[in-house]
Structures are given as structure tokens and as C-alpha cells.
Image: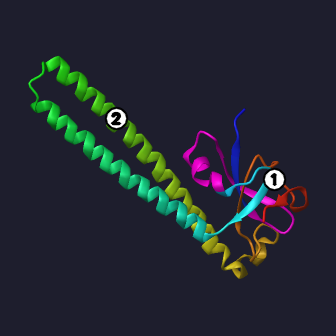
Amino acid sequence: MSEYITFYIKGTDRYYPIGTYSRADFIFSAFYSFAPYNQVRAIDEKSINSIINGTKNALDELNEREASYKNRIEIVKGCSNSVEEKMEQIEIELESIREIKQTRERAQEVINFCLFLLGIIEEISFGEYYKDIGDIITPDSYIYVGIEVPDWPRIDEVEEYK
């Protein structure tokens, strides 16, 4: 059974979902340590920026690994092995580079999602502009996150993690 992490905006009587991600998604992994089971927890700008910085550091490491694989390809080209052996090793290195590129794309998705959340927090901080929306957004709203929380939970149906 797959687990899901869901992000919410808190209204006056319920939590409104703004995104759900499965365990297989990088976003699940990035926010896992912040998200309680069957509860919701407010996540602030500092926590989101921490995830962005950690992801950027991981991207830097991926770039270094990719450069290393490219360097190894150049070394293999200069070896005196048979063409078949060289091609086999180069293909191994190229496969590693393809995997790094996929990982980089997924890591960038985490950063983009974090920037989306920061944008929501910034907009919510100007809550007086949302008076006409009523229950949907309140000036004291935050982004909340939880794992395996019921759909569209009412405030009284789910415990807030402290």
C-alpha cells in the first residue's frame, strides 16, 4: 500500500488540500521528516528554505558526479583496450549520467514546489486582501503537511502536531 503526503492551507473550519504526493515522489522524501502520520503540522518558511538548501547541495553533488563520469569517459577513450571494451565502459558511464540527469530533474521539481509553497505563504501574509474569500484563506493560515490524513479534514477531525 502506498503512502501519501498531503499539503494543506488551514481555513476556519477545515484544511484545504493543495497537493498530494506518493512515497515514490521526491517531494515525499524531502518533506518526510516534517510530516506526522494521521496529523497535520504547520511548516514555515525556515523549514521550506532548509529543504531548498539541502536540495541545492544535493544538486551540486550530482553535478560533481556527472563531471566525474564525463572525465572517466575521456580516460576510457585514451586507453589501449579494444574498441568493444571501451564502448562497453563508455555506455556504463553514459547510463550513470542519464540517471543523474533524471535525478536532477526530480530534485528541481522539489525546489519548484518549495518556491510555490513560499509564494503561497507570502500571499497569505497579506491576508487582508482575502477577506472576500471567507473560510478558504484566513490571515493566520499556514502551510500544513501530513501523511495519511483523511481527505478534506475538518479542524476538529484531525489533531495538529505540536
Q: Is residue 100 magenta?
A: no
Looking at this rendering, what residue extends furthest in the bottom direction? 128
User: Mark 1, residues whose alpha carbon is within 10 Å: few (<14), some, or many (≥20)?
Assistant: few
At a point 91% along the width and 61% down the height, the residue shown is 156
Q: Is residue 127 left or right of residue 12?
A: left
Secondary-structure class at tag 2:
helix
- Residue 96 numbered mark, or none: 2
At a point 81% along the width and 72% down the height, the residue shown is 134
- Amino acid marked by disc 2: Ser
Which range is magenta? 9-33
Q: Is residue 5 left or right of residue 51?
A: right
Among the 4 quarters of the image, the one containing residue 56: bottom left
Residue 83 in the image: state x and y as whole percent. Answer: 13, 20
- The mark total stands at 2
Earlier-in-chain disc, 1 versus 2: 2
Q: Is residue 26 magenta?
A: yes
At a point 66% along the width and 78% down the height, the residue shown is 125
Q: Which residue is mark 1?
A: 152
Secondary-structure class at tag 1:
loop
Whether residue 81 is situated above or below residue 19 in the rendered picture? above
Looking at this rendering, what residue extends furthest in the front direction? 80
